Amino acid sequence: MKTLTRALIAPENPDVLVIAHRGVWQALAENSLAALHEAILQGADIIEIDTQTTADSHLVVIHDANLDRTCNFQGEVSTLSLETVRGARLKASDGREGMMLTHERVPLLEELLEEARGRIVVNVDIKYPRDVERVVSLILRMNMADGVLLKSKIDMTTQRFPLALTDISSTIPFMPILHARPGLFAQDLRHIEQFGAQMIELNFTDLADVIAARDELQRLGVRLWVNTLDVSHSLDFSDSRAALDPDGVWGVLIDAGVRAFQTDNVDQLVRWLKDNGYKNA
């Protein structure tokens, strides 16, 4: 089933994957249940969401440390009760000035995971290390270990690895986030083979480093995820440019070995992939 993480990201799945960044939020509230439902409707394979705890230790789905940008209420999430956080209403889109209030509330992580169950894989971005154990416990208690994907940065320069996540990666699918060091990406892939990761989220400053590692990626059976978000800074491979020249962005990256894209333009990417034979209709 493609709603099971390991089957979805396995090299045997020929589809190029689409990850909806905080759901589909251009006309809806980011990280909301409505944005989740729209991501499913538009054909995304994975939804990326953010989670952190309230003052009374409830996991909620919100990106920023405070409510100010996305809600009609102010305050730091970690200092507020769940009742206060849930009392706020989410603004449409990314909450920038002028966005209307919606009827959406900040979701509980448990609530969003239940809505996603069997419909779409959830990439849970744990905003603070303090919350790792609580998130893992919730996922296991809900029996959703193979319906989610956890991730964490790996610093190859200092060799500092997320050991706590390594310990649970055999139970819950785990994706390292890696920067392609110039001339060293293929070598670094061999160093992180210990994680048994099926997918890596990659930032890069030279596409040649990505291309040079294609054989190593195939040997390891690792799928490569790249963000084309306008704030990703992987050269000029952005959603804005892809809207005008999808072949020059998504096409070039696929030729370089990329097999998953996180985007804020889900509908266009899904249609382009299907039209070009990179995704089953």
Image: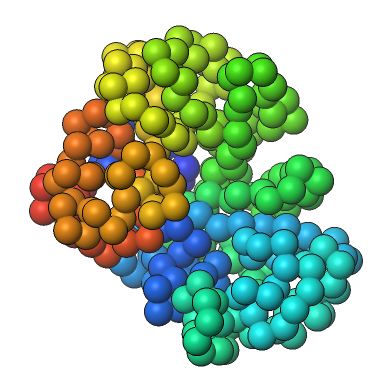
Residue 36 vertical placement versus 229 (above, below) = below
Residue 104 percent coordinates (x, y): 58, 83
For image coordinates 55% across by 17% down, the residue present is: 192
At a point 45% along the width and 58% down the height, the residue shown is: 21
User: Could you tell me which residue is drawn at 53 percent across and 82 percent down?
Assistant: 97
Q: In the figure, residue 167 lies in which quadrant?
A: top right
Looking at the image, residue 199 sits to the left or right of residue 266; the answer is right
Name the residue nearer the viewer: 71 or 125. Answer: 71
Residue nearest the observer in this picture, 148 or 226 = 226
Give the percent coordinates (x, y) of residue 121: 47, 52
| Quadrant where the image shows the C terminus | bottom left
Q: Nearer the viewer, residue 136 or 256?
A: 256
Question: Is residue 109 shown to the viewer in this render?
Answer: no
Left/right placement of residue 262 relative to residue 58 reads: left
User: Quarter of the image holding residue 218?
Assistant: top left
| Residue 241 seen in render | yes
Q: Residue at x 58, y 39 (%)?
A: 151
Indicate whether 214 appears above or below 132.
Answer: above
As displayed, is residue 165 above or below residue 20?
above
Q: How many marks?
A: 0
Residue 262 percent coordinates (x, y): 39, 50
